[in-house]
Amino acid sequence: SRSIRLASIPGDGIGPEVVAQGLKVLSAVLPQDVKLETESFDLGARRWHATGETLPDAELAALAEYDAILLGAIGDPSVPSGVLERGLLLKLRFAFDHYVNLRPSRLFPGTDTPLAGRPDIDFVVVREGTEGPYTGNGGSLRTGTPAEVATEVSVNTAYGVERVVRDAYERAQARPRRKLTLVHKNNVLVHAGRLWKDTFDRVGAEYPGVTTDYLHVDAATIFLTTQPERFDVIVTDNLFGDILTDLAASVSGGIGLAASGNINPAGAFPSMFEPVHGSAPDIAGTGRADPTATVLSVALLLRHLGYAAQAARVEEAVEADLAARGAARRTTDEIGDALAARVSG
Amino acid sequence: SRSIRLASIPGDGIGPEVVAQGLKVLSAVLPQDVKLETESFDLGARRWHATGETLPDAELAALAEYDAILLGAIGDPSVPSGVLERGLLLKLRFAFDHYVNLRPSRLFPGTDTPLAGRPDIDFVVVREGTEGPYTGNGGSLRTGTPAEVATEVSVNTAYGVERVVRDAYERAQARPRRKLTLVHKNNVLVHAGRLWKDTFDRVGAEYPGVTTDYLHVDAATIFLTTQPERFDVIVTDNLFGDILTDLAASVSGGIGLAASGNINPAGAFPSMFEPVHGSAPDIAGTGRADPTATVLSVALLLRHLGYAAQAARVEEAVEADLAARGAARRTTDEIGDALAARVSG
Ligand SMILES: CC(C)[C@H](C(=O)O)[C@@H](O)C(=O)O
Ligand SMILES: CC(C)[C@H](C(=O)O)[C@@H](O)C(=O)O
């Protein structure tokens, strides 16, 4: 009989509330014969305040033994900026070689968009997750003086770019529209830009069925607001992907619905699934957090682990729930219950 | 009697067409006693194809003698990406120390926006223009091989950050809402981010009347689409400013209306004014280019040279013209004529 060993990192703010709903829906959708074992890891702001630890080696090693990780949200205003982001979230992405940061955007019926005319939005961003300006390379000289110089180094390797570009072509080829857009800024960032563009063109020769396009990142923001329907799969670097996926979330139902997977495609390490939103400390504990982004992240988790039918059931449940949402505000728990009922129904 | 010595760089594609209208409106709005001398510099794709030159030293030295520069657009698909951008446009911004890249966004009545509900948009982005990831620092190792490493280095100095942050505070203080938002990504780019945030806080102590705010660049894209009215003045680095101002242009009437000034506030070098849009080779020569962004850039030029009343006249003319625009399509020349008539009327 099959089993899933799942580590959860509920984290801070609304993290624990939304993770609870994600786990509820996961339990409800799994076939009876699949044994689900979950363990929760206490990491985040509370832990850091209590012990000064962000992610001890022993816990990193323990996490490596799971099939997947479900993360709620990390961060609190009481912790200096960067400590948890770099010491925990990015550490996990880098240690577990999550080079595909997968972020789908779809404008579901019944949801809000700031765009007039509700364009037809259904694309996925393949954001590189282990290189670029996120490596922590850089430093400062004469720090805090009027003569300070601070640098940040974007590191891009042929190895790192090729594997994510290849993954994006595979995804594009498996979708009906078969279109892949590279987003970069190769007219200014000429070294990294050349590596990305050359790799994109060279690998593309192996995928003759995929239509390709290139956009500078600044122009991409225009198209995301004026013609989002032109996108199918986007592949881009770590920082551009960060920016574009928040914008993509905004135009396609809001950050409360945006799911993501930090994926190690080969499965050498557990992949990690998390809503794109943050810990929202202002609404923590009020029952107002929408768990939908976490539930959609559970769908990505299911698909990654080979439960494609269950992933589709979760996505259909979300779609039906959103379409049926009235004006009445439901609590986090009520939304989780409704989704769990739909997937088991 | 007063005089303005203006260098124009019409450039490529629709550049010459829109610059002609900008000069027409400039002549029409200037008081009789101001002598306007203009000289056109032949730089851009045509020149590069003919001679291989982007911006020879002699022409850079000649340009330095002018009071200001009006640039149309640079770039053509026939020129490899980066050649003209770095060899001409960025070379001018860096050589003339244009550390304030000023980009106002305003949603004028009568214009299109992709946003539902036409929010009230009236803010200005102060984009750093001489540092960050735009310095050309970086390189590649084992280029073109499977073992390639390509880097891009963002260089940020206390000197460079403080002067642009100070300029932004001055601009915020002079506006009715007196609000300044710093946009960066200081939870990931911790070295540059700390320098920017510390400088922002320290200089802010000198401007107690200015309300301040900080946003990560990814979150800023959300607010630009959902609550653009929250922004008054934004200060940010060169790359984030590039991205945010295209998005800002998109939501506030489109790239066809977005003006910019590359400003050296102290006046040691000529400042350069240019529409944010590109050379649009697809519509070059058809008379369909909208010269409005160039005319609004002329307003920024006038204000920079001390002709505030004339700058306001140009902006009012644009506002009135946009409000009166019907469904009938006018040519580039007709729009220029209409604006020239309004400012001289
Ligand atoms: C919290 C932060 C480090 C993170 C990122 O920049 O990747 C977040 O914005 C995201 O998109 O997951
Ligand atoms: C053409 C390019 C180099 C330029 C930039 O990135 O600054 C343009 O996008 C702009 O915003 O003026």
Image (cartoon, coloured by chain):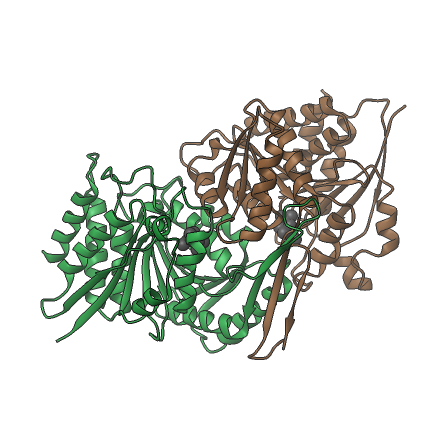
Chain colours: A green, B brown
Task: Indicate the position of residue B154 as horizontal and vertical percent values.
Answer: 62, 56
Image quadrant where residue A13 sits: top left
Q: Residue at x 42, y 49 (%)?
A: A246
Position of A304 relative to A22 (above/below) = below
Image quadrant where residue A298 sits: bottom left
Image-based side of A21 in relation to B176, left or right? left
Q: Residue furthest right?
A: B1
Task: Indicate the position of residue B156 as horizontal and vertical percent values.
Answer: 65, 50
- Foreground: B195 or B335? B195
Position of B60 relative to B180 (above/below) = below
Task: Indicate the position of residue B46 as horizontal and vertical percent values.
Answer: 76, 58
- Foreground: A90 or A277? A90
Q: Residue at x 54, y 72 (%)?
A: A199
Image-based side of B77 in relation to B40, left or right? left
Position of B327 relative to A243 (above/below) = above
Image-based side of A257 in relation to A195, left or right? left
Q: Residue at x 36, y 75 (%)?
A: A266
Task: Indicate the position of residue B29 as horizontal and vertical percent values.
Answer: 75, 26
- Quarter of the picture containing the C terminus of chain B is top right
Q: Residue at x 79, y 25 (%)?
A: B30
